[in-house]
Image: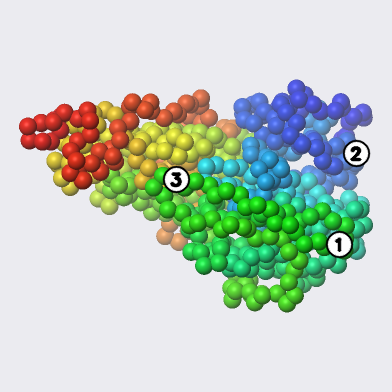
Amino acid sequence: MPPSSPPPEPAPGTRVGRFLLLEQLGQGGMGVVFRAREENLGREIALKVIAPLFAHDPEFRERFTREARAQASLESAHVVTVYAHGEEDGYLYIASQLIPGGDLGQMIRDEGPPTLVEALEVIEQVASGLADAHDAGLVHRDIKPGNVLVRRRPGSIRAYLADFGIARRMNADATRFSTTTAGTPSYMAPELHGGAKAGPSTDIYALGCVLWVALTGTPPYQGMSEFQLIAAHVREPVPQLEGDSAMVHATNRILRTAMAKEPAERYQSAAEMGSDLQAALRLPVTPGAAVPEGKGATALRPAVRPAVRPAVRPTGARPAPTPAPPAPPAPPAPGATTPPRPPSVPRPTPSPDPSPAPPAWLSSTPTPRRTRRGRTWWIAGGVAATVALAGGIAAALLTGGDDDPGGKGGDDFLALQPKEILQAAEKDMSVVRNARIRGQFADGGDTITVDVTATTSGDCRGTMKSASSGGTAEILRVDETVYLRADRAFWNASTSDPTTTTLILGVIGDKWVAENSLLESTEAFCDLDEFLERDGREDATATEVGQSSVGGEKTVRIEQKEGSQREVLDVRIDEPHYLMRIEESDVDHFEFSDFDKDVTIEKPADGDVFPLQEYLDTIEKGLGALPGAEESPSGAPSE
């Protein structure tokens, strides 16, 4: 029952049940969002405290509970995870995943619009999350830059759709809340202003508007009043970028389709829009340029930035934009070859009439949704053999029912269905910042053993060992640089010439070697998010196969099968429900421990790093050893 009198306004320092409010992150019509600490678990989360206007209304409270449960059951790599909801100390709240990078709108205000490729990649990820929400029967109803959270890392960006605060199930009966026009006028589909019901098509329209904001930094339509703004959405042509590259033409087609005035002319699903965004990303960025390459959908590849933003204007006035001077090109990395940056960037321009013919792939036929890439571990690069782990390291942790399985332990937790247990494990693992990973996997006739502390920043430290050679190497990955320190057996297994091993060890001693050929490959096990990424076992069956113990913690064992693939996952019974072990075969298995321990991973001092590549270059050129290497009578460095 709602309290008889409202509690005081929440503020940093206030306790809401087990949550301590630390910092206000934002405020909207539905309530206030705080960075908070869930004290029983010691983790930081985002806590939205619902405004009293809504929290004290019985009809809203009933719908809020129903939709919070639905959102908690939604599994998506690009939707913010909901952990818990309820009422504590008179406050109605919803606790969710904390994304530290802020939202897309703030990023644009701080840094300016992203590049063309970055903008397409961000919106493609949001489209993936929106498709998952629609598949679960949820309509967002308020997609805007402030509800797209972003987390940047060197060379990549990850986007999450957030705040389903006014979301509604597609088949839900209208209430006095859901019949009120919901959303933000700058991103609302034209039919909503005529009283039409929100649905997937209106979400897609809003996502098209957000794509324009990501491209240019401003909304697609502007006006002196809300009436003029609504009229622009209803009557004005869809804005377009200037430019002749295939990527620009494809982007304009996506804008026209997503923001079509008639719902029937828009994409029929967010998945279809996401597929076209993926296809656009495979096209040349500039006329005559090579197709951009990258390591995946989130890699930030060289691209152009819009040089101007659309001028703020009343409806009906369409002045030609004035080009801004081009930004200077970024200096290339030493030794790298990069395509020349064009002198100017696609500019916003009114929609052409007639429009240029689109590429063949941009048809009205829906294209398949993205499949997540499999996980392959490349343990070696230029100095060791390549090792691959077949299948997924961390399997798909599947979605359960509508009820939130979090907040349970002991017998209550064991009473959940196997898929609900895996869902709870996924949620608790999604907020872990670092963990120790120990395990082994088969590599041909060899078995590789690893013991690393992995982090969500991509930094790591640990060891890897070959069973056949007995060789061991320490590995350290810091700030996008990989360092190795290996023994003789490791180097012997890495080269076919024992003389080379003697040469290397003689000059290296016990120093580290920078080995950046391993940079991308080590991400698979140094980046905790990458290690735990789902590999798409949506059709797998999950069965409980008993209880066990891992690292002194009681676990419940869940077996997943899909075709010939099988894996057994041990999930901690007590809270937090961490994934403790994963077993894919008699040889391949990994254990997790030391979650969120205080760790410091620092690069070695400059004096402790030997410039091996420079040394080998001088040998190859016949210039002798580097200064400091003692010469033996035979001319080879002595040990």
Judging by the rendered image, the residue that carries numbered circle 2 is 53
Q: Residues within 10 Å of mark 2 (few under 14, many from 20)?
A: few
| Earlier-in-chain disc, 2 versus 3 | 2
Q: CA distance from mark 1 to mark 3?
A: 45 Å
- Please name the residue shown 85% across and 37% down the image: 51
Q: 336 above or below 192?
A: above
Determine the residue positioned at 27% across, 52% down: 444
Q: Residue 89: horizontal and vertical position, in percent? A: 81, 27
Front residue of 512/263: it is: 512
Q: Which residue is found at the position 84% from the left and 30% from the top?
A: 90
Q: Which residue is mark 1?
A: 317
**Quadrant hosting residue 343:** bottom right
For marks 2 and 1, give the CA distance.
Answer: 40 Å
The residue carrying mark 3 is 333
Dot 3 crowding, Cα within 10 Å, few <14, some 14–19, many 20+: few
Q: Amino acid at mark 2?
A: Leu
Q: Tag 3, which secondary structure?
A: loop
**Residue 63, horizontal then vertical, whole percent:** 82, 48
Amino acid type of the residue that numbered disc 3 sits on in the rendered structure: Ala
Element type at mark 1: loop
Residue at the image point whose x is 67% and y is 49% from the top:
113
Give the quarter of the image for residue 277: bottom right
Q: Nearer the viewer, mark 2 or mark 1?
A: 1
